[in-house]
Amino acid sequence: MTSELGLTFIGLAIIAVTVGILIRGRTNPVVAMTLIPVTGALLAGFSIPEIGDFFGEGLESVMNVVVMFIFAIIYFGIMQDAGLFTPIIERLIRMTRGHVVLVTLGTAAIAVIAHLDGAGASTFLITIPALLPLYKALNISRYILLAIVVLSASVMNMVPWAGPVGRAATVIDTTPDEIWRELLPIQGLSLVMVFAIAALLGYQEMRRIAKLQASGDFRGSASVDVHKVADDFVARERQQRLDDGVVRRDATWVTIVNVALTVVVIAMLVSGIIGPAPVFLIATSLALVVNFPTAENQSDTLKRHAPSALSMAGVLLAAAMFLGVLNASGMLEAIAVTLVGVLPAALGPYVHIIVGLFGVPLDLLTSTDAYYFSILPVVEQTAGTFEVSAMGVAVALIIGNIIGTFFSPFSPALWLGIGLAEANMGKHIRVTFPIAWAFSALMVLAAWALGMLI
């Protein structure tokens, strides 16, 4: 059997190679997180049956999360098909009245609502086309639009059916809703901060525009027809559903049931009365019956949303192999023991906080999968030797990193947002990075002060 030092080197090699492949984007995460740990385990002298046992142990920790993700993605896809959030967003656009500060505040509110499904791509598809005409007409910078949408979506990404919390839950072997309940106080504080930042950015833009008007260089309009913008948004959403071939019941009672069902789902997740997997399985089944009149319509709906659901499920199942090999083989423990030996004793109890404070810069260096499946396990094992709880470590790293989720070039959804906004990635990073990092660091310190990171 390989020595502890050998396990340390092989474990670090597995992590380094996997991170490198994920960052370069040369292959699907499923491939990297399956083949690299299997190869490492074979090199460490483990047999094929032992590797099968490692996968079995990893599978036990991720299966509930996999089921939750599959049905959560389908559930919120159904709510998008039903246009559940369209009237709210339409109303918010009208309420801005073309005032710069109200527009930026409205942008934050719309992005928060749009990201209730936890999907970055749909958030950008809803918010950017709906609001860009307002920003262009009023001469507000499109990079302010991107910054506000990115910050709002990142804070909402703390919900249990979004990717980061689900990934963290598989690492520390808990459920996403348990982590979310720990995150709720800081998520609430972060939402307040998002609106404060949106108001400040709006005020700065208003001053900049006033200077342009005074100098005669203003190229926008002093007013804009927000009602036309809102009508265009509703028409675009309706056309999208037609293009997708959505055939559903369109009645007031259906909308009422959808709202009630969504409220009950969130209440169940917050209360913890029942696990998130059965919550979304039951809710999805009810949503299919309520919104789609025939078995064929229901099957078409499942097929329409299956690719997104199975894509995330595949990554998590591959993570079962990656984490199973690292954990069950003793590699993570060996790495932690080695790190503790070289880490100054005074820093040991705070290693997770230190990493959390650098979460946003790390987002520029690693992908989401690499961060949660490679950095988090090592930090958890290391901090655990100083009696820091796994939950405390996970919360620190989530808060530290999640604010930067959608400003990193490793986020495919962001490239969609950049294209929709007709913007430049480099300038977006220059504008958003200092705001996101300061925001993130402040939230980590706030969580520490609240006793959430022990």
Image: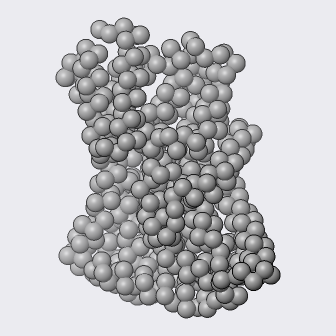
Residue 60 seen: no
Residue 399: x percent and y percent?
60, 45
User: At 60% from the left edge and 17% from the top edge, which residue is drawn?
Assistant: 343
Residue 451: where, in percent of width, then height?
71, 37
Classify residue 447 as left or right of residue 176: right
Q: Note whether 323 is above or below 367 in the view shown.
A: above
Question: Left or right of 113: which side holds 106?
Answer: right
Q: In the rendered image, which quarter contains the C terminus? A: top right
Q: In screen coordinates, is 331 left or right of 450?
A: left
Residue 450 placement, left or right of 147: right
Residue located 35% across and 37% down the image: 21
Q: Taking 447 as reference, is 303 above or below it?
A: below
Q: Is residue 224 visible?
A: yes
Closer-to-camera residue (136/58): 136
In terms of image quadrants, where is residue 362?
A: top right
Quarter of the image where one finds residue 11 = top left
Query: Toward the viewer: 158 or 293?
Result: 158
Q: Examine the rendered structure and indicate whether residue 65 appears above or below residue 243.
A: above
Q: Nearer the viewer, residue 143 or 384?
A: 143
- Residue drawn where x is 62% and y is 51% of the image: 433
Query: In the picture, which quadrant includes the N terminus?
Result: top left
**Is 417 located above or below residue 236 in the figure?**
above
Q: Position of residue 65 (x, y in %)?
A: 39, 47
Residue in the image at 20% along x and 76% along y: 296
Residue 295 or 329: which is nearer the viewer? 329
